């Protein structure tokens, strides 16, 4: 086995993922559900060691982490960097003191935008990865998810971005609201398209179109799978309506998993936009690698 | 004490309210949290008796109930009546068999609209009450709440209606979403107005404006009370945006509690609409009384 030279960590609200990295990429991966959301500050180091201890030696192992681990409720707060700026910067990482002398931990800070007020943590590293994988890219990145981000990138910098609560609204409405009674796993492409079209053409009616999912189920037999797909279409539609200045006539790349990539590609295609997609995990690793490389350049 | 001649019941998802009624109005009131949401079909009669047994005699006491008690998941399903129609009708009430011979129970059905698909249960009785209290009223009724209703009334009939998930979205977002970290009780009138104006002028940006509440708290010190009021403004704003065909240039009456009446009156006033408000409980009682009177007319 190749030698482990550093450790990459993606530490979100719900999950912790770590990769043992060699000179040519990842050698091993470990994950746990020790997300930021359930840890107090003194629980982060034990949670990390629980995953990566097998990879540590007596030498000081560099560990670079991104995500909600650097939030105010995280391990230690890594102050936001204000856009416009490069997505990551070696001189802005936060050094975290550890009790275990076998590692040095650095946290990549998120980005903020003053007006309109907006923030991201974790996505900046995926953006850095997308730029590392597509040198010279200028255009728009879309990072669908719990809090979807639309990002304008130019000359290697994040120029502006905008967040939409799409994924969180979908989770709340499909599992916690009255709509849950008429929702089930499954999918229906034409129901998705209808929801998308409804929201894009009449975004002002969104709160009414949501309740109509319930009424359509009661009165016209809208199936649980159709209701779920139409809800997804409505919420991605209202996101695309608000993000129109980002995608209209633009070169768009998606950063997400395959399921979301399929939905967003289909949705953007109805608006005449051909989007390419990049794998989110590959972007995270490429971004952390770029940051680690940049840190190594500092004398 | 005057003689109890019948019993009025408002049975919603979360609560059960009953009134002992005499010839001149309510003589006593009793409430419990035995809402439809937590009862199986065989638990409704005991839950009702638990409240009203002290009011029963050996004679058969008429009990008239409205609300979710008549839903598919309720005591027994009272099939929707399709609009256009009067809000209530004596010949459409559902007679429920009871084990206890001291009462006869009737449930008022809700209303449905085929296109756009929509349903209501309980509000139809409040509408009947509003018409009883305001004979000859023609115009628009707004019933703010968990599922806000806008209703066009003409010549004593419900012509059309539209439901918005406003109250449920407020509850989910303020207590279950990432926004809960920056929310607390309290109020701020100008934050409400800002949210209202944002949503009315740019309804397409609603999913982004929601996340901005979080970012404004982190970056610009938006207080928890301001965040809560602005969330309310955003959600009432997106409702008013979608309901514009209902209120524009119309004679509007609100049916709700005093807190919601203040918010909706203020919101409608910014759009040049002067709304009068009617108390929701008074309307429920007036509606059930009108229905009981009509039932009494049947030979």
Image (cartoon, coloured by chain):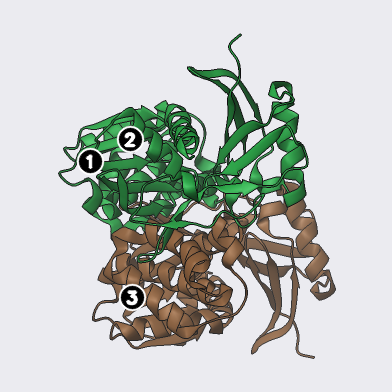
Chain colours: A brown, B green
Residue B83 x/y as whole percent: 36, 56
Q: Secondary structure at mark 2?
A: helix
Q: Of A252 and B289, which appears nearest the observer? A: B289
Residue B69 x/y as whole percent: 61, 46
Q: Which residue is mark 3?
A: A197
Q: Mark 1 to mark 2: distance in Å? A: 9 Å
Question: Would you call the spot at circle 2 few (<14 residues within 10 Å), some (14-19), or many (20 or more)?
Answer: many
Q: In the current view of this chain or complex, which residue is farthest to the front? A: B299
Task: Look at discs 1 and 3 and give the one toward the viewer.
Answer: 1
**Chain letter of the residue beneath label 2 in the structure image:** B
- Mark positioned earlier in the residue sequence (1 or 2): 2
Q: Of A85 and B274, which appears nearest the observer? A: B274
Q: Mark 1 to mark 3: distance in Å? A: 34 Å
Mark 3 and mark 1 in contact (Cβ < 8 Å)? Answer: no
Q: Which residue is mark 1?
A: B138
Q: Quadrant of residue B144?
A: top left
**Chain letter of the residue beneath label 3 in the structure image:** A
Q: Is residue B216 left or right of residue A70?
A: left
């Amino acid at each position: 086995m190749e030698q482990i030279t550093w450790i990459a960590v993606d530490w979100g609200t719900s999950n912790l993922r770590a990769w043992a990295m060699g000179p040519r990429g990842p050698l091993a991966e470990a994950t746990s559900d020790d997300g930021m959301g359930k840890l107090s500050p003194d629980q982060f180091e034990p949670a990390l060691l629980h995953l990566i201890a097998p990879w540590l030696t007596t030498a000081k192992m560099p560990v670079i982490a991104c995500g909600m681990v650097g939030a105010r409720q995280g391990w230690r707060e890594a102050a936001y960097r204000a856009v416009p700026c490069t997505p990551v910067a070696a001189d802005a990482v936060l050094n975290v003191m550890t009790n275990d002398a076998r590692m040095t931990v650095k946290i990549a800070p998120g980005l903020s935008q003053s007006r309109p007020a907006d923030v991201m943590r974790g996505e900046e590293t995926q953006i850095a990865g997308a730029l590392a994988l597509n040198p010279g890219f200028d255009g728009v990145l879309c990072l669908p998810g719990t809090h979807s981000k639309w990002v304008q990138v130019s000359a290697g910098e994040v120029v502006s971005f905008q967040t939409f609560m799409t994924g969180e609204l979908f989770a709340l409405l499909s599992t916690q609201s009255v709509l849950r009674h008429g929702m089930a796993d499954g999918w229906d492409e034409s129901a998705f398209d209808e929801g998308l079209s409804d929201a894009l053409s009449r975004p002002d009616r969104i709160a009414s179109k949501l309740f109509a999912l319930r009424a359509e189920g009661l009165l016209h037999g809208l199936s649980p799978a159709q209701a779920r797909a139409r809800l997804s279409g409505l919420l991605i539609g209202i996101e695309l309506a608000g993000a129109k200045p980002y995608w209209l006539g633009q070169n768009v790349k998606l950063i997400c998993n395959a399921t979301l990539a399929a939905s967003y590609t289909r949705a953007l295609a109805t608006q005449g936009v051909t989007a390419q997609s990049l794998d989110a995990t590959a972007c995270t690793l490429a971004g952390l690698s770029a940051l680690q490389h940049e840190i190594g350049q500092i004398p």
